[in-house]
Image (spheres, rainbow, N blue to C red):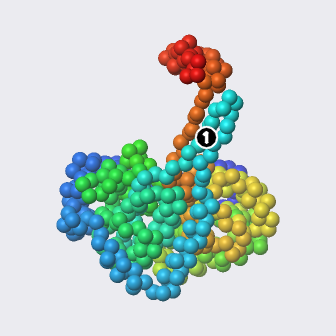
Amino acid sequence: MIEIVRYTGDLEQPLLARIRSRQLGADSEIHAAVAAIVDDVRRRGDAALLDYTEQFDGVRPHPDALRFDMRTAYEMAATVPPDLAGALRGAIVNVRAFHERQAERSWEFSGPDGIVLGQRITPVDRAGLYIPGGRAAYPSSVIMNAIPAQVAGVRRIVAVTPPGALVENPAISFVLVELGIDEVYAIGGAQAIAALAFGTETVPKVDKIVGPGNTYVALAKKLVFGAVGIDSIAGPSEIVVLADRTANPRWVAADMLSQAEHDVDASAICITPDAVFAERLAAEVAEQCMLLDRRGIASASLARYGAIFVVDDLDAGCELVNHLAPEHLEIVAEDEDRIAALIRNAGAIFFGPYSAEVVGDYFAGPNHVLPTGGTSRFMSPLGVYDFVKRTSIIRYTRERLLATGPSIAAIANAEGLGAHARAVTIRLEDDTSPDE
């Protein structure tokens, strides 16, 4: 079910190449179909949304019903069991507390001759939140995508989700009510992304789109990027567990399977210097997989993109981790702080046997929207900083321009941009101070 492979430092060995090959899988026909939907919504607006809702969701809403009546959400929220309601409220508190620490502040400083330089932080005006329907509708994702926008100060959060989603998933309704998000539109798929990106008669154009979705949604986000900001093009989930002989193979197996059950393209990997532990872990993975409701998905994921790599030592394991640049990294080993100091590429790091990856998925507080597919080499988790803009502040004085103008003009002339140089020299030539 899962391979045990000796890693000798060869980054081109076949299994690693196969794991690296995971990507947003979509053939040319799907690309063309998504592009056609996006273009149609941009041209025809609400009429296109109604047509695609009928085509893909089997219902044709009245144009006035594209926006959800939030009374339905309140009714469905009231049906959520008290224990789940309490858990979701606790998650909201934790996630908000974490993200409040990410809030940036505008700043300025004074320089020579009275100049003032700085940076102004302002939130985007509107954020769009995509909420999948069906089995992929996760209330935790709504929490993780909405709260950073709220903490950033985004004035208007616009949610989109397929028709019936608020009734089919009461927990989604509960979270929307708890967060105070009351502008929700009954559209899903690529057409919803296009509506948020370009606006229609009913759906407002937003500045940034976040939230998970299927291949059609991901491709639509990729196509509209530039007209609107997006969080990322998320790939399948992945976990790497860096473990030594002190790790519990039953617990590590459970953590690997928690990601493998997501999708047949998910990846679950353990890296260990202990060959005996590797054998015990492989047996545990096989045994526990058979107990899962989603064992078909998990077993396919493990067979295609799962692995247990046996390394010479944990330092070599860290080298492999940095190459994989995983979304989730668990370190279950002695001297975990020393090991973590060697890690440069990971979306989130979970320390010790009790920091199961699912703690981060649901409750701890840090965002579970993380870079996938090796993109933690250059990307970060979703955060408050994704919903703000940084504007540079430059307040120059006459004295400073007189002192530095020749240098500015020299650089402009060296670049062959005479008008740039002239914009400074004309001030130096014609300088007249108001007090002279």
- Relative placement, left or right, of 328 versus 132 is right
Task: Please say if 314 is above or below 415.
Answer: below
| Residue 40 x, y percent position in the rendering | 24, 50
Residue extending furthest toward the front = 435
The count of marks equals 1
- x 77%, y 71%: residue: 245
- x 56%, y 16%: residue: 431
| Residue 192 x, y percent position in the rendering | 32, 58
Q: Is residue 238 visible?
A: no
Residue extending furthest toward the bottom = 82
| Residue 203 x, y percent position in the rendering | 30, 57
Viewer-closest of 234 and 164: 164
- Relative placement, left or right, of 232 versus 396 is left
| Residue 262 x, y percent position in the rendering | 49, 69
The quadrant holding residue 72 is: bottom left
Q: Quadrant of the C terminus?
A: top right
Viewer-closest of 151 and 22: 151
Identify the residue under disc 1. 118
Crowd rating for badge 1 (residues with CA inside 10 Å; few <14, some 14–19, many 20+): some
Q: Quadrant of the N terminus?
A: bottom right
- x 71%, y 67%: residue: 351
Task: Please say if 311 is above or below 422.
Answer: below
- Relative placement, left or right, of 401 versus 69 is right
Mark 1 residue type = Gly
- x 77%, y 64%: residue: 336
Helix, strand or loop status at disc 1: strand
Task: Please say if 399 is above or below 32.
Answer: above
Q: Is residue 68 visible?
A: yes
